[in-house]
C-alpha cells in the first residue's frame, strides 16, 4: 500500500478547537454547509499527539479489460471517515461513516471487487457521462449537425452509452488542498472526438476530496475542442443505515425543490416543470422515502428542479436515517437532482444481490434530454468555455 500523508496546520488547528469546544454528537443545523470545527461528526479526531491523520493511500485493485492497472484510493480524515475510489470509472467503492454511537459502516452500495464494476449494470458509485441520464431516442442537433447516439435503454440513450465514463480507465493523482484542508484524488479522462457518437475531444477532470467537516466534495471541470453536450454526475446509491439493513424506505428525505419534471413512459421529461404541491413528489418538508412511494408508478426516478439560491453550491437535500442517526446533506451548483430509489435493483448477481429500494440516489445534474429542450438550462459546452460544477455531500449525526 502506498501512503501519501499530507500534513496540514489548519487541520491540527481544527482539531485543537474541536477538542477545546467539544466535538461530535449533535449537529445543530445539518442544512448549513458553513461549518465550524466544533460540529464535525462523531469519532476520535486525529491521534493522541494531535497530529492530523488525514491521508490518501493507494492499493492495487485489479486489472482492467486491457490489462490496465486499476488502483483503489482511500481518503481518510480525522473523524473515522474513509472514502474509497477506484480509477475504473472514477467510481466510489465505499464510504465509511460513523453513526451516532461512533460505529463505522459503509453507506454506499457497491460490488465486492473489480469484476462487478467492469460491467457495473446499476452504475454503483460511478461517474456518468458524457451525458448522464437520458437523451430521447439518442438523437440531438447541435449547430448544423445531427448526432446519433447508441440506444442502450430502449428507446433512449442513457448515462453516456455502451462505454460511459463509468466504464473507462481514468488517470489518477493524489492531491491536497490546504485552503480547504482536504485530501483527495484528481481523476482525468480524455474522451475522443466521436466516442459514443459525441462531438469534440473532451478533457474531463473530477476531483474527489474529503475534509474534517466530513464533506465529500466532487469538483468537475471540462474543456472541449469542438462544441459538444455535457452532463456529468456521480451515481452513488446510499443506505445510511448500512448495507445489511434492507430497504431505505424509512429514511427521511427533505428536498429543496418546489418543482419536478414529469416524464413519459420511457422516463423522458414532458417539458413541464410541475409543482410538487399536493403530489407524492413533495419532499419540501421531511417525509420518509416510503411514505408515498406506492403512489409513484415504478418508484421515484425523477429529476427535481433545485430551488434558486443566491449562494452556490445551493442546498439540494437533507437525508436523515433515524436508527443510526446518520445525516447526509447535499449541496450542488447543478440545477437539477435525479431522485432514484433503486427501483431496478432485483437481488440478482448483476447488482451484487441488492434488493429493490435498498439504496437511493441523489444524482445532481442538468435536466434529462436538455439537448432537445431549448427551454431547459443549456448543457452545451462550447469551444473555449470551461465546464465547472461542484457537489458536496456532508455527513453528520443527530441524536
Ligand atoms: C438512473 C436512471 C434510472 C436507472 C439508473 C440505473 O438513475 O434514471 O432509470 O437507469 O440510473 O439503473
Image (tube, rainbow, N blue to C red):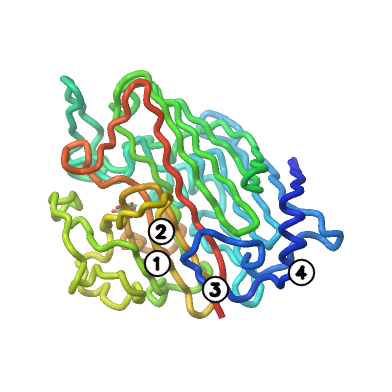
Answer left or right for 368 relative to 207: left
In the rendered structure, find residue 355 and report the number of the disc placed on it. Answer: 1
Q: In 3D space, how far apart are the residues under numbered discs 4 and 2 (Cα atoms)? A: 30 Å
Name which of mark 4 and mark 3 comes first in the sequence.
Answer: 4
Number of other residues with Cα within 10 Å of mark 3, as a class: few under 14, some 14 to 19, many 20 or more: few
Answer left or right for 366 relative to 41: left
- Mark 4 C-beta to ligand 1 under 8 Å: no
Name which of mark 4 and mark 1 comes first in the sequence.
Answer: 4
The residue identified by callout 2 is: 315
Residue in the image at 35% along x and 35% along y: 130
Q: In this orientation, which residue lies closer to the viewer: 283 or 147?
A: 283
The residue identified by callout 3 is: 28
Report which quarter residue 26 is drawn in: bottom right
Residue in the image at 46% along x and 72% along y: 320
The residue identified by callout 4 is: 20
- Nearer to us of marks 4 and 1 is 4
Q: Quadrant of the N terminus?
A: top right
Q: Residue furthest right?
A: 49
Where disc 2 sits, the SS reads: strand
Where disc 1 sits, the SS reads: loop
Is the C-beta separation of discs 4 and 2 under 8 Å?
no
Where disc 4 sits, the SS reads: helix
Report which quarter residue 375 is drawn in: top left
Q: In 3D space, how far apart are the residues under numbered discs 4 and 3 (Cα atoms)? A: 18 Å
- Nearer to us of marks 4 and 2 is 4
Q: In 3D space, how far apart are the residues under numbered discs 1 and 2 (Cα atoms)? A: 30 Å
Amino acid at each position: 500500500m502506498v501512503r501519501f500523508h499530507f500534513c496540514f496546520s489548519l487541520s491540527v488547528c481544527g482539531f485543537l478547537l474541536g477538542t477545546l469546544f467539544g466535538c461530535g454528537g449533535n449537529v445543530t443545523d445539518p442544512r448549513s454547509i458553513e461549518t465550524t470545527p466544533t460540529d464535525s461528526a462523531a469519532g476520535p479526531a486525529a491521534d493522541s499527539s494531535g497530529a492530523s491523520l488525514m491521508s490518501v493511500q493507494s492499493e492495487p485493485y485489479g486489472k482492467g479489460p486491457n490489462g490496465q492497472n486499476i488502483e483503489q484510493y482511500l481518503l481518510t480524515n480525522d473523524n473515522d471517515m474513509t472514502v474509497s475510489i477506484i480509477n475504473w470509472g472514477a467510481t466510489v467503492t465505499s464510504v465509511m461513516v460513523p453513526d451516532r454511537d461512533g460505529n463505522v459502516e459503509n453507506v454506499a452500495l457497491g460490488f465486492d471487487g473489480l469484476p462487478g464494476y467492469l460491467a457495473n449494470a446499476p452504475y454503483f458509485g460511478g461517474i456518468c457521462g458524457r451525458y448522464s441520464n437520458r437523451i430521447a431516442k439518442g438523437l440531438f442537433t447541435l449547430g448544423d449537425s445531427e448526432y446519433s447516439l447508441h440506444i442502450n435503454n430502449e428507446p433512449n440513450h442513457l448515462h453516456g452509452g455502451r462505454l460511459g465514463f463509468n466504464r473507462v480507465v481514468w488517470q489518477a493523482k493524489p492531491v491536497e488542498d490546504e485552503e480547504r484542508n482536504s485530501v483527495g484524488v484528481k481523476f482525468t479522462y480524455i474522451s475522443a472526438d466521436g466516442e459514443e457518437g459525441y462531438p469534440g475531444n473532451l478533457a474531463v477532470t473530477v476531483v474527489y476530496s474529503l475534509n474534517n467537516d466530513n464533506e465529500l466534495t466532487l469538483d468537475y471541470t471540462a474543456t472541449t475542442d469542438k462544441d459538444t453536450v455535457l452532463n456529468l454526475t456521480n451515481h452513488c446509491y446510499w443506505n445510511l443505515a448500512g448495507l445489511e439493513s434492507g430497504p431505505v424506505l424509512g429514511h427521511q428525505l427533505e428536498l429543496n425543490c418546489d418543482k419536478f419534471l414529469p416524464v413519459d413512459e420511457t422516463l423522458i421529461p414532458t417539458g413541464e416543470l410541475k409543482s410538487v404541491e399536493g403530489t407524492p413528489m413533495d419532499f419540501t418538508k421531511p417525509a420518509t422515502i416510503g411514505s408515498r412511494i406506492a403512489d409513484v408508478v415504478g418508484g421515484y426516478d425523477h429529476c427535481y428542479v433545485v430551488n434558486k439560491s443566491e449562494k452556490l453550491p445551493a442546498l439540494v437535500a437533507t437525508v436523515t436515517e433515524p436508527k443510526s442517526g446518520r445525516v447526509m446533506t447535499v449541496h450542488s451548483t447543478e440545477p437539477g437532482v435525479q431522485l432514484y430509489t433503486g427501483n431496478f435493483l432485483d437481488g440478482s448477481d448483476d447488482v451484487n444481490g441488492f434488493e429493490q429500494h435498498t439504496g437511493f440516489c441523489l444524482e445532481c445534474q442538468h435536466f434529462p434530454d436538455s439537448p432537445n429542450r431549448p427551454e431547459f438550462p443549456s448543457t452545451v459546452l462550447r469551444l473555449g468555455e470551461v465546464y465547472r460544477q461542484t457537489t458536496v455531500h456532508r455527513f453528520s449525526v443527530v441524536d
